[in-house]
């Protein structure tokens, strides 16, 4: 009899309990979905004799409302109890210590270099590691077959010798000049690749920061001023600097910059090989040919450029005597470096 089923299910519903919102939802499906226990009573209702329809219809509707209210109530209380569980979290409890990592010394020094030049108004740009001959050599005034190309042992791609791994970040100068007219005042950090035997002094992968300043009336005095400021910020205000004439195809005149030995202060020791000086970067006035190659008029604009090895600066800054340590990722080595911030 329908009336008995209604009573039975009513008792069941009144006793329902749910631990969680998921339990309450399962009950909704059990009783109120299209094939649910309450819903299916409405099918039975069709067979009820006409004189009983009014009374049973009412009871059935009451049952449905009861089920809806009960399940809504179970859902609400399940949700609020899960919230109160969250509120029960003891925020004063002693946390387990998570060991802090440290920044890689190369990242620390690279960011310091960028930061010092940023204070002189230099922005930062990057370029691709896989480059072509034009950006690494030709646009930078390396003539074809010129021995200067051998200064940097290049990794070429076998199937296409026009494609290579950049040997210096000077290639980013070209990428920036071809996109923009002066004034340009930027530094270009990045990884470079050279086909060199790995030793305590050299690695086949290392990092450089290149710099370029092009505007009207830029002189060698500006170069000296900017790079002296850099050296004093990086190695301390007592450091001495000197520029030695040098050669790079893309600068004329070219120079190399030395700082007084960071270890012996210039007296002469094993690190500076008795000379009292350490080389830290190459630099020079941008060769007019380089400007022309990039559609910048050398009669209007002039500029200076410089490039330095990040590993070299880091070795001098931190007294590291083997470049390979930077690539081994031995945590006992890496843990010793703290950035200034
Ligand atoms: N590209 C040179 C190198 O890798 C470094 C360098 C020297 C960059 C002189 C310059 C520069 O911009 O003017 O050894």
Image (tube, rainbow, N blue to C red):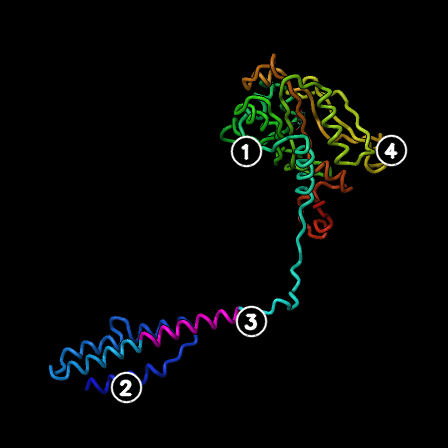
- In the rendering, which numbered label is found on residue 252? none
Tags 2 and 4 touching, CB below 8 Å: no
**Residue situated in front as seen by the camera: 122 or 261:** 122
Ligand 1 positioned in quadrant: top right
- In the rendering, which numbered label is found on residue 128? 1
| SS state under label 2 | helix
Q: Nearer the viewer, mark 2 or mark 4?
A: 2
Give the CA separation, mark 2 to mark 4: 101 Å
Main SS class of the magenta portion in the image: helix
Other-residue count near label 3 (Cα within 10 Å), few / some / many at <14 / 14–19 / ≥20: few
Q: Give the range drawn in magenta.
A: 68-86
Relative image position of residue 314 (x, y in whole percent): 72, 39
**Residue situated in front as seen by the camera: 244 or 110:** 110
Q: Earlier in the sequence, mark 4 or mark 1?
A: 1
Give the CA separation, mark 2 to mark 1: 76 Å
Q: Nearer the viewer, mark 3 or mark 4?
A: 3
Tags 1 and 3 touching, CB below 8 Å: no
| Above or below, 92 relative to 13 | above
Q: Mark 4 highlights which residue? A: 268
- Give the quarter of the image for residue 97: bottom right
Q: Mark 2 highlights which residue? A: 8
Other-residue count near label 1 (Cα within 10 Å), few / some / many at <14 / 14–19 / ≥20: some
Q: Mark 3 highlights which residue? A: 88
């Amino acid at each position: 009899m329908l009336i008995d089923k209604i009573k039975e299910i009513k008792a069941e519903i009144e006793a329902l309990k749910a631990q969680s919102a998921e339990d309450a939802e399962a009950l909704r499906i059990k009783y109120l979905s299209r094939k649910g226990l309450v819903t299916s009573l409405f099918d039975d209702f069709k067979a009820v004799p006409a004189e009983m329809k009014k009374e049973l219809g009412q009871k059935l509707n009451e049952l449905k409302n009861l089920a809806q209210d009960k399940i809504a109530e179970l859902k609400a209380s399940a949700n609020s109890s899960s919230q109160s569980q969250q509120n029960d979290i003891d925020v004063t409890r002693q946390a387990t210590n998570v060991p802090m990592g440290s920044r890689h010394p190369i990242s620390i020094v690279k960011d310091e270099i960028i930061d010092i030049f940023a204070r002189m108004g230099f922005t930062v740009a990057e370029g691709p590691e896989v480059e072509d001959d034009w950006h690494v050599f030709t646009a930078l005034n390396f003539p074809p077959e010129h021995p200067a190309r051998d200064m940097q042992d290049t990794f070429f791609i076998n199937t296409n010798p026009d494609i290579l791994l950049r040997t210096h970040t000077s290639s980013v100068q070209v990428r920036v000049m071809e996109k923009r007219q002066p004034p340009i005042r930027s530094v270009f950090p990045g990884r470079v690749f050279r086909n060199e035997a790995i030793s305590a002094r050299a690695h086949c992968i290392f990092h450089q920061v290149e710099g370029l300043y092009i505007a009207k009336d830029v002189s060698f005095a500006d170069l000296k001023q900017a790079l002296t400021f850099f050296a004093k910020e990086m190695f301390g205000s007592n450091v001495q600097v000197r520029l030695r004439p040098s050669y790079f195809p893309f600068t004329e005149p070219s120079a190399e910059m030395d700082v007084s030995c960071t270890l012996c202060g210039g007296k002469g020791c094993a690190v500076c090989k008795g000379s009292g000086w350490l080389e830290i970067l190459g630099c020079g006035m941008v060769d007019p040919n380089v400007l022309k190659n990039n559609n910048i008029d050398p009669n209007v604009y002039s500029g200076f450029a410089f490039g330095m090895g990040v590993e070299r600066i880091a070795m001098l800054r931190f007294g590291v005597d083997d470049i390979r340590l930077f690539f081994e990722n031995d945590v006992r080595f890496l843990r010793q470096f703290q950035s200034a911030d």
